[in-house]
Amino acid sequence: MNENRYLRWLSSKTQSVFWHDSAVKTEQAEAFSNGAAGMTTNPFLVNSTLRNDTAFWKERLSALPKGLKGDEKVLALVRCVTGYYSDLMMPMYEQGIPGKGYVCAQTNPNKTGDAEYMIAQAKTISSWAPNIVVKLPATRSGIEAYEECTALGMNVAATVSFTVPQVLAVGEARARGKARAERNGIKPGLGIAVVMVGRLDDYLRDFACDSHPEVSEECIVKAGTACIKRAYGIFKERGYDAFLMPAGCRGANHITDLAGAKMIMSIAPKIADMLKDVEVFEERIEVPVNAGIIDSLMKMSEFRRAYEPDGMKPEEFITFGSSNRTTAQFIECGWNPLSAFDYESL
């Protein structure tokens, strides 16, 4: 296995927790040798590993019932992958260390506006194993489902999330759901609020090109970092116990600028490779984004919506540009291709 000194430092010498963002077996093995303690998956990643590493999954796929269709088929395929990894991580999970030993599985991204549908599907997914984390979208309906699932004791992560107002709504839903669980004698599960930092940068880059060409690339690549740092401070002030999770990273800076934070960091193999070249091991979570960069970014209405705690109302979350882009990818490159995946002919 290739040694990654930065990731080993991050995962062993700071309070940051490293989760691997891929479902490919060889990549998973290397990540865990360098300190990974959990895994994030989504429909796109599950589809990718089943199609590109079919030989590894063939035996497990052959055990699936024949003739499955629709959601039943997709969930069986998702369970095929996440179930393998949840078994692999069970000994770590059983140690009881917060944030360690988990694997994520996502609900149908075609249904991000249907809370009841998502709750029903979350119940199915969470029944697979105690260390499964159900991923729900940070839409108004998804956050409603998040609270209910938290109240039922499930491990839950809010994904398709890019902004301060989204994760604050998730933090509040987590607090309400946790209180309900405890009143009913239910042990609350793990709670996560994702900020897809790089995907926010991607969207704002296009927005700047279209409407504010004076906003430089130097500023754009700090947008997601600025948002998650602001959210982190507010989470601490309000006492929210959900873990913030930087995800959708595009550069090593999305991790190095957050090093030392009490966060669960979703790190894809390409970002892990970039981190191999980092020579300065420094906790930077308390280092603010340059005020001049913030001032430049604030020229853009879409950044203000993402950065200000009251920048959006919950009913606007589903229409935010990054939300539309990411949901479309999860549908068209993940869930729908899984629905068409011919596992019976392997």
Image: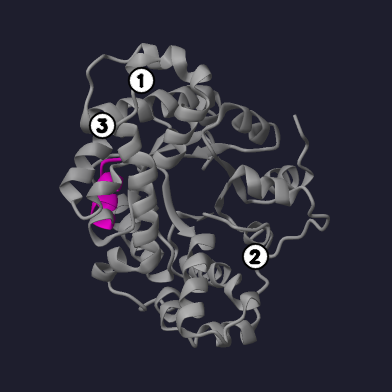
Q: Callout 2, which amino acid?
A: Ile
Return the residue nearer the eye: 226 or 148: 226
Does 229 appear above or below 248?
below
Question: Which numbered disc, 2 or 1, marks the residue that appears first in the sequence?
Answer: 2
Residue at which label 3 appears: 124
Does 294 appear above or below 62?
below
**In this picture, which residue range is highlighted in magenta?**
143-153
Question: Which numbered disc, 1 or 3, marks the residue that appears first in the sequence?
Answer: 3
Describe residue 45's horizontal placement relative to residue 260 as left or right: left
Q: Callout 3, which amino acid?
A: Thr
Marks 1 & 3, CB-CB < 8 Å contact: no
Residue at which label 1 appears: 343
Expressed as whole percent of the image width and height from the top left, the position of residue 219 reads 61, 77
Does 265 appear above or below 187?
below
Which residue is depicted at the point 43% across and 81% down? 304
Task: Answer whether residue 101 is visible to the viewer in this image.
Answer: yes
Describe residue 48's horizontal placement relative to residue 178 as left or right: right
Q: Which marked residue is nearer to the observer: mark 2 or mark 1?
A: 1
**Furthest residue in direction left, as rendered:** 116
Which element carries disc 3, helix, strand or loop?
helix
Count of marks placed on residues:
3
Residue at which label 2 appears: 285
Which residue is depicted at the point 65% across and 76% down? 218
Disc 3/disc 2 C-alpha distance (Å): 37 Å
Expressed as whole percent of the image width and height from the top left, the position of residue 222 reads 60, 72
Which residue is depicted at the point 76% across and 60% down? 282
